[in-house]
Image (cartoon, rainbow, N blue to C red):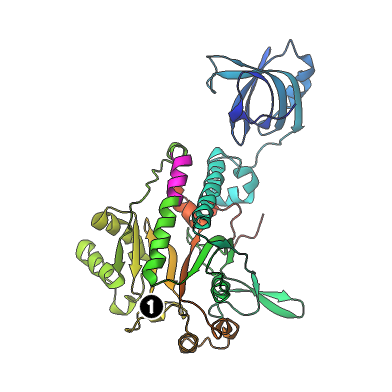
Amino acid sequence: MERTYIKDIAPGVHRVQGFVENFRNKRTMAFIVVRDISGKLQITIEKEKHPEFNEMLDRLTVHSVVCFEGEVVANDYVKLGGIEMLPDYMRVDSYAEALPIKDDSDIDCRMDYRWIDLRREKNHLMIELQTTLTAALREFLLERNFLEIHTPKLIAAASESGSDVFEVKYFDGKAYLAQSPQFYKQMAMASGLERIFETGPVFRAEKSYTNKHATEFTGFDLEFSYINGVEDVMKMEEELLVYALGKVKEKHGEAIKELYGMDLEVPKLPFPRMKLRDVYDELEKRYGYTVPDELKGDLTTDAERMTKQLAKDMFDHEFLFVTDYDAKERAFYHMRDERGVPQGYDLIWRGVEITTGAQREHRYEVLKAQADEKGLGKDVAFYLEFFRYGCPPHGGFGLGIDRLTMLFLGLSIKEVQFLFRGPNRLTP
């Protein structure tokens, strides 16, 4: 008999397999709640009819893995969908020892036993949400003639600045783990691929212990050619996010509200845009927040957090594009206008930066000068070669799948990654 997912169970004869979520072993009856990835089902056993089950029932523990076959019947007294299974076959595939963690164990203890922690219904929803989100991002781009590429994560030179990268032994030499697919995305533009995206691991050698940073995370990056300016990049991103958030809300919105108490709002188009200096002016005028002039070329952590309220008060919106950063605070490959202002942006959602995007500098001589200005000439010599033989105007951005999930559910970065990696975490 083929296994039936519990969500598909209806009256009739079925076979189910899963974990034991709850178990009551009484003198004449046993009641077992079995859970698989799709739902829960009550198994009701009359011991007198099945003495062959008794030894297994006496040894059974919560979280053991079991298999039952039998008839599923309607029962108005059963809370789980008004049905139950009356099995004529039972097998225990794996007996579970007493669990070393509970739902309310501290986060680091739960990370030590992450494979057990992931069994929780809330964590199953989290993984389902990420699956829907990534599929929606792909779907949106494939419908717009994007191609999916896969760039290397072992690289010969530190990817952007010579710092914040992991160095690894590579045969008789050394290599680095890529902190971004940025250079190879742009190589694809020089290759004439025009529109590409990638999802894959990203590595950051930063000793940061905040609730939104990790040393390895999953990035979703895209780049596309023949743009007219950075506005084209922002428009692409806002439309992509509205589409993806709509798909997530449609499939998981009710479950997110039930299990996490979070309302998922699909934002209106277009997203509001503000220049960085105007953000600081409004933060001071509305909330009395000030910073020294020398810090106003970038968005401080406190200012980033306060944009959540600012976007709500000014635009009744959860998202905010912030533009016109100081050139010294932006990557050398961002195009600059005639005033020297980088043609890039940060996108803030609920007070957290989720994207740095830009129109890229595609002119070899200008790009080389900007790299030299930041003292990166030798480190990025291989990258500069991409632009010596013609390259179309282009731009792009990257999103962190883990950080988006964190904001969907109101959790920390540790809790939304399948396995978290940070300065003090390399296992399991």
Q: Residue at x 53, y 82 (%)?
A: 390
- Residue 94 as seen in the image, left or right of residue 25: right
The magenta-colored residue range is 244-253
Q: Is residue 185 left or right of residue 94?
A: left
Q: Which residue is mark 1?
A: 342
Camera sees residue 353: no
Residue at point 33%, 52% (across, down):
268
Tell me residue 300's x, y (percent).
36, 69
Q: Which residue lies at the image location 72% right of the left edge and 13% below the top edge?
A: 47
Indicate the position of residue 367 as horizontal and vertical percent values: 48, 85
Whether residue 82 is visible: yes
User: Does 309 sit left or right of 112 as displayed?
Assistant: left
Give amino acid for label 1: Pro
State the residue in front, 317 or 406.
Answer: 317
Q: Quadrant of residue 295?
A: bottom left
Give the image location of residue 98, x and y in percent: 68, 36
Quadrant of residue 151 within the rendered picture: bottom right
State the quadrant of the C terminus. Answer: bottom right
Considering depth in this image, is 237 or 374 the residue closer to the camera?
A: 237
Look at the picture and state if 11 lies above or below 332. Answer: above
- Vertical position of residue 291 compared to residue 248: above or below: below
Seen in the picture, residue 364 relative to 406 is either above or below; the reply is: below
